Image (cartoon, rainbow, N blue to C red):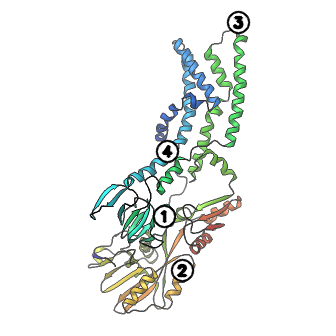
Amino acid sequence: MSTATPARAPHSDVPAGHKPAEGRVGTGLFDPGQLVRSLPDAFRKLDPRVMVKSPVMFVVWIGSVLTTVFSFQHPGDWFGWTISAWLWLTVVFANLAEAVAEGRGKAQADTLRRAKTDTVARRLVTDGSEERVPGTALTIGDLVVCEAGDTIPGDGDVVEGVASVDESAITGESAPVIRESGGDRSAVTGGTKVLSDRIVVKITTRPGETFIDRMIALVEGAARQKTPNEIALNILLASLTIVFLLACATLPPLADYAGTHLTMVVLVALLVCLIPTTIGALLSAIGIAGMDRLVQRNVLALSGRAVEAAGDVSTLLLDKTGTITLGNRRAAEFVPVAGTTEAEVADAAQLSSLADETPEGRSVVVLAKERYGLRERHQGELTGAEWIAFTARTRMSGVDVEGRKVRKGAAGSVIAWVKERGGTVAEDAGPLADRISGAGGTPLLVAVEDARGARVLGVIHLKDVVKEGMRERFDELRRMGIRTVMITGDNPLTAKAIAEEAGVDDFLAEATPED
């Protein structure tokens, strides 16, 4: 059942869209805030049980302790204090690089954890009233109410109502999906967003076992791993350290024989200069630098092992939504039926989309404005208009104004609306919709009822818009010997069309998060 409310269009001014800024993105790996947050962890890593894992830096740590003790014994020896300060700075710097790497994973997990704990659920109680509780307090069997704009607080099944749900954060599917009670379309996932209507969800997972909880566990488990080359280099550095340690141990007797006294500070300073201290201290920093360079090019690496493996990549798996495409379906063209002009379809499509707050609805308004120069109507120009908002039940939006009714929506819904009013459906409306579907797009029919009766005016072609320059980039990857595969939750027909347009080598359609 449609809802008609005399009001102005929900969005009176839709931006014409803007091209995303090109170039490298900013990085948070070396920003001052990240360094300050990681500094306490760097000092905690001064624990000898942690330092012993890196033989070179453990030797430097021991040297730092010895020179500090010697400096306290001889307070006036500024040379000793200077050497001690430099050695401690060296050890802390090496630990700081490692702490920054580990802090990135903790920050990502904390962000997900906040999203989970900040969600408020409207739980139904036995008398039918609602109570607001944290999403983390829900247990199996609880009933929660979700309306348009609400975030579903936990994994469960719809037991009442039908709604349009945005699952792009989970599946990558740009188009909203219909979730309703009964059948195989009743399951919903915590963290997804209700776009229209009202549903009652029965929670089916225990606290700590939801999809978001699994994502947190995955991120926290992505600890920095040493690469094979890094392990081999550590063995080499440890061997060199032992050699130079033995060499320095022989110097005091030789110095005494020559009549020269070598202090502990001098011996430690000499040892630290001889052993590969710089390489040992920079190993973690080198890994961070590699991860930083990838982040600047929009590639997230969770470990130094991933950076090293990047040189051996032969196949690149890419999510469609937001990576290959812009993220939402957009209106690409207005296709009129026989006896109707594109201008008529554009005018009716724009009118019927003013009450549609979905990204698709806004794109229709933008296309009509940019391609056909149609200025968007305002409240003063549409006095007495009744806006028909999009709902999951009607699957239509529109407006009743100036003696005519305009509707836009799914083909089946619009055709049923026209026939209910005794109108006729153009013979080429069905073939036009089938052609758009066959090309991987989504057809939306536009209809009007006026003095001439109810009739279909044409079809709006919605499509996933491939980002500019993607085909050229995939061609470059192909020349490098890298095969590209697109992964999407779309149906095979749509996936095939997007894959051909983008120029990827292969695609995987109807992919679930587990896939």
Q: Are marks 4 and 1 in contact (CB under 8 Å)?
A: no
Label 4: how many Cα within 10 Å (few below 14, some 14–19, many 20+)? some
Helix, strand, or loop for circle 2? helix
Which tag, 3 or 2, sits closer to the chain's start?
Answer: 3
User: Closer to the observer: label 1 or label 2?
Assistant: 1
Q: Which residue is mark 1?
A: 168
Q: Could you say which disc has been placed on residue 259 in the image? A: 3
Q: Amino acid at mark 4?
A: Lys
Between discs 1 and 2, the one toward the N terminus: 1
Q: Name above or below for residue 347 compared with residue 146.
A: below
User: Residue 342 location, x and y as percent?
Assistant: 46, 84
In the picture, the quarter occupied by the N terminus is bottom left
Q: In the displayed structure, does residue 221 sit left or right of residue 150?
A: right
- Say if 264 sits above or below 114 in the image: above
Q: Are marks 3 and 4 in contact (CB under 8 Å)?
A: no
Q: How far is disc 4 from disc 2 in space, using C-alphas?
A: 46 Å
Residue neighbourhood size for the residue with mark 3, other residues' Cα within 10 Å, grouped as few (<14), some (14–19), many (≥20): few
Label disc, if present, on residue 59 of the rendered structure: none
Note whether residue 60 is visible. Answer: yes
Q: Residue 334: where, in percent of width, then height?
A: 48, 80
Answer with mark 1 or mark 3, whichever residue precedes in sequence. 1
Q: CB of mark 3 within 8 Å of CB of mark 2?
A: no
Q: Quadrant of residue 289?
A: top right
| Label 1 SS | helix
Q: Residue at x 62, y 44 (%)?
A: 304
Residue identifier under label 4:
106
Q: Residue at x 70, y 58 (%)?
A: 480
Q: Nearer the viewer, mark 3 or mark 4?
A: 4
The residue that label 2 is drawn on is: 436
